[in-house]
Amino acid sequence: MKNMLYIAGLLCLSAAHTFAQTKDPKDTEVWTPEPRVVTPGVNNSPPSDAIVLFDGANFSEWTTDSGESPKWALADEAMTVVKGAGDISTKRTFGDCQLHVEFRTPAVVKGEGQGRGNSGVFLQSRYEVQVLDNYQNRTYSNGQAGSIYKQTIPLVNACRPPDEWQTYDIFYTAPRFNADGIRTAPARVTVVHNGVLIQNGVEIQGTTEYIGMPKNLPHGKAPIRLQDHGDAVSYRNIWVREL
Amino acid sequence: MKNMLYIAGLLCLSAAHTFAQTKDPKDTEVWTPEPRVVTPGVNNSPPSDAIVLFDGANFSEWTTDSGESPKWALADEAMTVVKGAGDISTKRTFGDCQLHVEFRTPAVVKGEGQGRGNSGVFLQSRYEVQVLDNYQNRTYSNGQAGSIYKQTIPLVNACRPPDEWQTYDIFYTAPRFNADGIRTAPARVTVVHNGVLIQNGVEIQGTTEYIGMPKNLPHGKAPIRLQDHGDAVSYRNIWVREL
Amino acid sequence: MKNMLYIAGLLCLSAAHTFAQTKDPKDTEVWTPEPRVVTPGVNNSPPSDAIVLFDGANFSEWTTDSGESPKWALADEAMTVVKGAGDISTKRTFGDCQLHVEFRTPAVVKGEGQGRGNSGVFLQSRYEVQVLDNYQNRTYSNGQAGSIYKQTIPLVNACRPPDEWQTYDIFYTAPRFNADGIRTAPARVTVVHNGVLIQNGVEIQGTTEYIGMPKNLPHGKAPIRLQDHGDAVSYRNIWVREL
Amino acid sequence: MKNMLYIAGLLCLSAAHTFAQTKDPKDTEVWTPEPRVVTPGVNNSPPSDAIVLFDGANFSEWTTDSGESPKWALADEAMTVVKGAGDISTKRTFGDCQLHVEFRTPAVVKGEGQGRGNSGVFLQSRYEVQVLDNYQNRTYSNGQAGSIYKQTIPLVNACRPPDEWQTYDIFYTAPRFNADGIRTAPARVTVVHNGVLIQNGVEIQGTTEYIGMPKNLPHGKAPIRLQDHGDAVSYRNIWVREL
């Protein structure tokens, strides 16, 4: 009897040992945190957690540098740059975000290089994703549509012709600065132009400068800014998700 | 006269000096290389430089592990997993790429957790972006739709309901290995699920393993692979661009 | 006279034009911010901006989990693990930092694999850089000296023999989490072992776990922790610089 | 008896079940690849797998642009720039590497800003880690010692005084380019200056340019280059490890 139990005990140990060797797929499951639910958009509408910045109705989310309502043109669910009306900025400020922007360069093609359908989307009011009519229009590579202006050349030129709506889907990570005011992590950005990847998590060197070098002084959240470069570029269906 | 010239000369120097101080915007233009032109798709069609992996017509770009034509079902411009028919792989091999995949989980909802609408997209045959019906169906966070399976939790749950077509837009960078066979740069991936960013340039830890730890042995280009996990998940409109 | 001036004027324009074309090296100078001055150490002493965590004199910067002064042995400007005395942690908390640690595994070599000269340096109390006597002592690759324990294999094995002092120079960037509690940037670490690069800016997958998968729940600054794994590993000359 | 065995059997099952739930630490061990052994240096000597580029004996590893032996001065185990003798380059080419360099700026301090103790270490002949006597000598931040010249400001100024030997420990990852000639991954570099971290895995924007913008044209492995900037900067104990 005693032996019998002893043998049974050995069997137990043996079995247990075998089982201990069996790796359990549950070991590599992680249950927390649980991602929250977002309802994706349908027919080009924004996802459920997006802040709609412009849906064609009004300028309620936008302001000028002098704090006035933008004097851009509003028609057909789009807003269009009016030369001299100036840049416009969101009233809200943003850091890391997913940004969807639709834009259209003018039907009447005039000018060349940077002089054709020029505008821009400034992340944190400082870092420009260039908007330009580069359809059969050559300019410097680091200044073409989808470039990080005067910095990073897009992987390809995925422009649509003038007068057609185009999309930028932008995934943006803000820079970090330390207590000394030195940047310890650059801003990063991925840009998808009309469904084509043109910037793949590239580092932003610093502020966009027309003349001279990018700057890197500390800053926090800041508005998204759209540029009046004198050309009648239109925008519509702008939304942002904070990441 | 001499004085006049002298004065004119001074003006020259002065002007020149001023101009030399004037920073020239041309200094920060970069003209090479020039990105090549890609014509973006319209109405959900692929960009001009995409390799179409599946357009609904046939399995010409795909094979099974035994080198045969896939036995998945082909109907309505889609292909659907047939339980037991096995995984399918592209005949071509890929490294860095942009991959567009559309998928649909079964209309008849049965099972729960990992047992509902389970399939997967394997990058380089090794790294799985999970396909699952996670619409009102909880599973472990690192195993839900859009997770790097058993590794990285998606930022949000952006699933559509069963029987609706969904999209994955994947931007993938392959890992690097040194002469010692040690990985010196991890694979990285961005995943956009139904237009919502769910993986933002995340590092892939290593091979997808159902049991145990990711592995990191050296490899080169490899096929894209779709998983037969026994559920009748459908795929359509699959294309890839080499980056 | 008029002609003379006209000619002089042309010369001016010409010169100015030439000068305008001449790019100015000053254009690419950036003067702010100005990095602060740090006096580097001499003869293995800490830099001027380092917080000295241990110089051999006492445990004033350290505590146990129960809030007591460590019961580790103190002798010859070193502190040595006393089995059962438990892990010790800095009283201060840290995020991004440069950490210098010197350690020595026991002169009397006993045990094998993980059983020989085992200890560890935990960054933010969660992420372990393994300390082990791996001199002619094989263990699993992701558990050897200088591994991110159970995660990332070091590039090479740069161990010194037992009873010799060794160094870890660690450059650490803390992880980031978003408002949903999801990790948006992993911790990163570079480790230089006895002057040899063994981890080059690698991503830390999550918390160090002896059993199971790394976890990624949000946290802020946290102590640096040294492990009592039962072996009489010694430490000396520990300092940290906040980055 | 039978009952006894039955009970024992139940105990077995129970135990086995319990053990199956017990996760096994072996599950998270990874044994391959095994890092190769490197013997670290002692008393400032190179590690065993280093290629010694300069040990004070001769210029056997170096050449000038015209393919001649360098005309730099050789004395006291150091080599010193001779104004007009030109830059020198390694005969071997390198990509990813760990580079150790020791340098000394002249004892006789003359000049200011960039005019004092100026030289440079060029990675892949293109990307300069600046060498300069910045001890109590202000210059533009992105041009000081340890800057990625005209690009990235060092975290701090860790210079030693003139006539003292200083060290750069550089961990370098070469850029990647795709088939279109577009850069898909930037070069990255970590620089430790006299034991102090001054560049933490920063992205290199492109080629070092005295005037104008960094360039990014495709290239492969290339020599390490030391600059003759006219100042009698000395170098010694230079070694490199391929990563």
Image (tube, coloured by chain):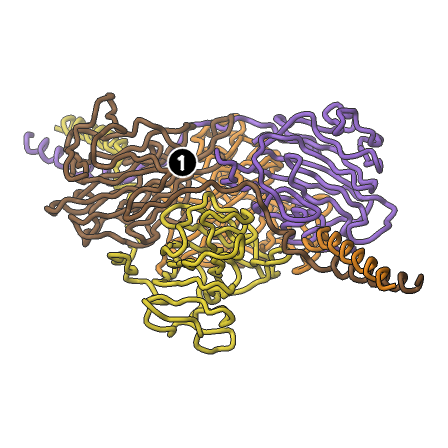
Chain colours: A yellow, B brown, C orange, D purple
| Horizontal side of residue A226 vs D62, given as left or right | left
| Horizontal side of residue A28 vs C51, given as left or right | left
- Nearer to us in this view, C198 or A129: A129
Q: Position of residue B4 (x, y in %)?
A: 90, 64
Q: Where is residue D206 in the image (x, y as percent from the top left)?
A: 60, 43
Q: In which quarter of the image is residue A92?
A: bottom left
Above or below, A213 against C171 in this view is below
> Given the image, what chain letter belongs to the residue carrying mark 1?
B
Q: Name the residue under label 1.
A: B242
- Nearer to us in this view, B84 or D190: B84
Decide if residue C162 is in sight here: no
Could you tell me which quadrant the N terminus of chain D lies in?
top left
| Residue appearing at x 15%, y 30% in the figure | B84
- Nearer to us in this view, D60 or D29: D60
Q: Position of residue C60 (x, y in %)?
A: 58, 57
Instruction: Name, please, the residue furthest toward the right.
Output: B2
| Residue appearing at x 20%, y 33% in the figure | B57
Helix, strand or loop for disc 1: strand
| Horizontal side of residue B197 vs D173, given as left or right | left
| Horizontal side of residue C26 vs B196, given as left or right | right
